[in-house]
Amino acid sequence: MNQASDETPRTAIRLGKTTYLVGMHFKEDGKETMNDKMIRMIREDVQSGNF
């Protein structure tokens, strides 16, 4: 797992009893909000059993 540098934007999101700390990079002209993207990615991981 890569460690986020001090400059990497990070946020915490809680789903149920699990809190995810997420470091990110993204396109500024993207169509999804950062929050929408994180929730989508976490849900996909949970559904596929990759958590």
Image: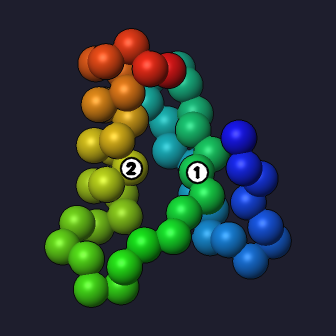
The residue identified by callout 1 is 22
Q: Residue at x 62, y 45 (%)?
A: 21
Q: Are marks 2 and 1 in contact (CB under 8 Å)?
A: yes
Relative image position of residue 19 (x, y in whole percent): 58, 33
| Numbered circles on residues, count | 2
Residue 51 as seen in the image, left or right of residue 49:
right
Amino acid at the residue labelled 1: Val
The residue identified by callout 2 is 38
- SS of the residue under disc 1: strand
Q: Residue at x 44, y 20 (%)?
A: 50
Amino acid at the residue labelled 2: Met
- Where does the N terminus fall, quadrant-wise? top right
Q: Earlier in the sequence, mark 2 or mark 1?
A: 1
Question: 15 or 27, which lies in front?
Answer: 27
* Label 2 crowd bin: few (<14), some (14–19), many (20+), radius 10 Å: some
In which quarter of the view is residue 32 placed?
A: bottom left
**Above or below, comparing residue 2 to residue 9 in the picture:** above
Q: Residue at x 62, y 70 (%)?
A: 9
Relative image position of residue 24 (x, y in whole percent): 54, 63
Relative image position of residue 5 (x, y in whole percent): 79, 67
**Above or below, comparing residue 3 to residue 40 in the picture:** below
Outermost residue on the left side: it is 31
Q: CA distance from mark 2 to mark 1?
A: 8 Å
Outermost residue on the front side: it is 1
Relative image position of residue 43 (x, y in whole percent): 31, 31
Q: Residue at x 49, y 36 (%)?
A: 14
Q: Which mark is residue 51?
A: none
Outermost residue on the bottom side: it is 29
Residue 49 as seen in the image, left or right of residue 11:
left
* Label 1 crowd bin: few (<14), some (14–19), many (20+), radius 10 Å: few
**Above or below, comparing residue 16 to residue 30 in the picture:** above
